[in-house]
Image (tube, helix red, strand yellow):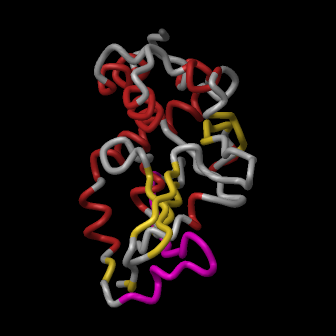
Amino acid sequence: MYRFSCTLCGECCSGEMRVFLNPLDIFRIGRFLKLEHSSELFKRRLLMLDKGQNGLQLPRIRFKEKPFLFCPFLINDFDEERGLRGLCSLHPEHKPLVCRLAPLSRHLDLNSGEEEFEFILPHPDCPGGKTDRILDPDRERDLLAEDLGLETRYYRLLSAHEEDPGFLWNFPLDQPYKNLIEEWERGARP
């Protein structure tokens, strides 16, 4: 059990953070933006590829660089009571899994299938760790079980297609996401 409650400071959405995405995240973001194909997120320079967990090339959010590094989905807002707040325009149903899990970090061993969760404050000066709210990692994991399961399936597919993984993040957004995963597991490519 850990003490944590998001204070909407926005610090975890800025700086050198790297927000890696799975295809369900890409699907949700693309649908939120009313795009027809996931490739449009790369063309609009909202996403890029980078080396991530298990050494795999993964899509991640490309942070804006001016006036400082920050997530393109971050909205700064001013509240009379609390001052400046950092809000996510994707919150709640389009928000990436890694952001919904925060401050829990998931480590997945593809060989054994074992997963481990670690409590990591999103930012060293995060005021969320100074609250009285208790964060229960087991409860959080249970709430996101379906998404975590889909992400595990994705990582397995990605490691099996490491030489040509592009089709796993280059797909149309006009069909249900679960259908895409099932097609990919059967060996079909868009």
Assess whether residue 122 is covered by the magenta stretch: yes
Pick the front one: 86 or 97? 86
Q: Total label count?
A: 0
x, y percentage for residue 124?
63, 79
Looking at this view, is 33 or 121 the one in front?
33
Q: What's the residue at 68%, 37% (across, down)?
A: 57
As for residue 181 lying within the magenta part, the answer is no
Q: Quadrant of residue 137?
A: bottom left
The image shows residue 37, relative to residue 22, as above or below, that is: above
Residue 60 locus on image (x, y percent):
61, 41
Q: What segment is highlighted magenta in the picture?
A: 113-131
Q: Give whichever of 96, 63 is nearer the camera.
A: 63
- The answer to which image quadrant residue 12 occupies is bottom right
Residue drawn at x 50%, y 82% as measured from the top left: 127
Judge from the rendering whether residue 48 lies leftward or rightward of residue 120; answer left or right.
right
Indicate whether 105 appears above or below 186: below
Residue extending furthest front?
Answer: 80
Indicate the position of residue 44 as horizontal and vertical percent values: 63, 24
At 55% from the left and 19% from the top, the residue drawn is 170
Q: Which image quarter is the N terminus in? A: bottom left
Is 9 on the left-hand or right-hand side of 92? right
Above or below 86: residue 45: above
Q: Position of residue 66 (x, y in %)?
A: 74, 48
Q: Quadrant of residue 150?
A: top left
Question: Which residue appears at 40% of the width and 69% of the height?
Answer: 79
- Is 25 located above or below residue 84 in the figure? above
